[in-house]
Amino acid sequence: MDLERLLQTFHDGTSLNLYVLTGQGQVEQEFIRPLAPHLPEIFIKKCLKQVNDLDLLLPDNKNSLGKFRYADKIIVGWNANITIAGQGNLDRLAPLLGFDQFASLMKSLYFAIFRTWPQTELTDQGFFTGENLTIEPMQKSADYEGYLAEQELMEAVQLGNLDLYNQRFRSFIKEGNIGLLGAGKLRQEKNLAISATTLYTRAAIRGGLAASEAYALSDQIINRLEKDTIISNFYEYSRAIGEIFVNRVARSNRTSLTPLVYKAEEYIYHHYADITSVQEIADRLAVSRSYLQHLFKKETGMTLVAFINQVKVAQAKHELIFTNRTLSEICDDVGFSSGSLFSTTFKKLAGISPLTYRKQYK
């Protein structure tokens, strides 16, 4: 059995944070949400003690933990209740689960591996993790890179591209202009979350989401967050709100494009660095190249090659601003076959050379 593939697929489908430990307690693999904390040492120690086929632990009112052994490994599921999910009737929420839901997921994972249902019960409760789940919002002076990081993040929302959004959210945490918007930690975090929700709303409308739906969703989220009495991880909280908008935009885009064109766009977003020809995309989607090219141009107004290059250049811009990688390394990262082709394509779309772009914006 391909355990890694099974765990990755289970994580992709459920958003549950999964960890593989050695028998000595070293973390060997992680299948986790963006910004999810690493498994705390106090949890790892608990995981080394086995009682039932599947042990379920309730450390405190913010965490659920499940563990079982597979060969010489320990498989751990951790539901860190540090986001907004489960606190309102919102679709496609971040991975905050009730304990019963969490237990059902862990039992399902156990069954997927062993083809039998586990003997299990709640085995422990009442130990705490202290402050290791809390990340204090940064306080730094606003700068232009922070503004660009924000614009890139909103572009990902506008595109309805979740992978791109999660990737750029990491840059936003590092570079974003996050200031003080209220007295007291909770009030400040709520105000920042409301500000982020406002930006997400506008970006979603630009991405094609109906204004009425976007503003209704915004009101629902803001009303919900105002009732919260604790925000344990502001960054994950804010990311989760954005994810809701990203998925709404993606769903909206599916209705404005035929399934074939939508799948082509999704394939390009995920594989832009490795695509070698339009024929590759057509083969993947099981259609003729000419038909795919015709339909794509008709619905998007651009050729497949132009769209691929647009995605590549957008990623190159990101790396030019937010990394110190060389032009040659960036060229390889985004999938251009040569430095000259990279420079020519970049200048055609951006109006300036990659080096000039870096000097101008970095």
Image (cartoon, helix red, strand yellow):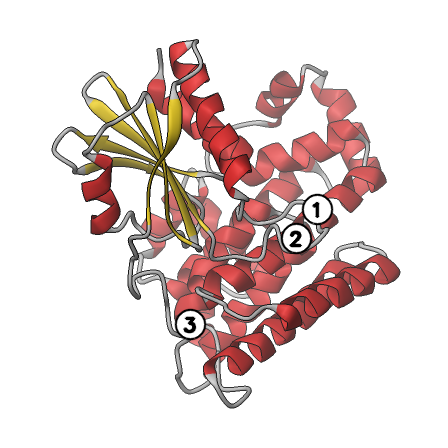
User: What is the number of the mark on residue 175?
Assistant: 3
**Residue 146 pos. (x, y %):** 47, 75
Circle 2 is placed at which residue position? 244
**Residue 194 pos. (x, y %):** 64, 74
For residue 225, what is the image quadrant?
bottom right
Task: Evaluate if marks 1 and 3 touch, with contact meaning CB atoms under 8 Å apart.
Answer: no
SS of the residue at dot 1?
loop
Task: Evaluate if marks 2 and 1 touch, with contact meaning CB atoms under 8 Å apart.
Answer: yes
Above or below 289: residue 183: below
Left or right: residue 4 versus residue 93 is: left
Marked residue nearer the N-terminal end (1 or 3): 1
Circle 1 is placed at which residue position? 91
Q: Nearer the viewer, residue 23 or 256?
A: 23
Marked residue nearer the N-terminal end (2 or 3): 3
Q: Nearer the viewer, residue 23 or 61?
A: 61
Left or right: residue 268 versus residue 235 is: right
Q: Nearer the viewer, residue 240 or 228?
A: 228
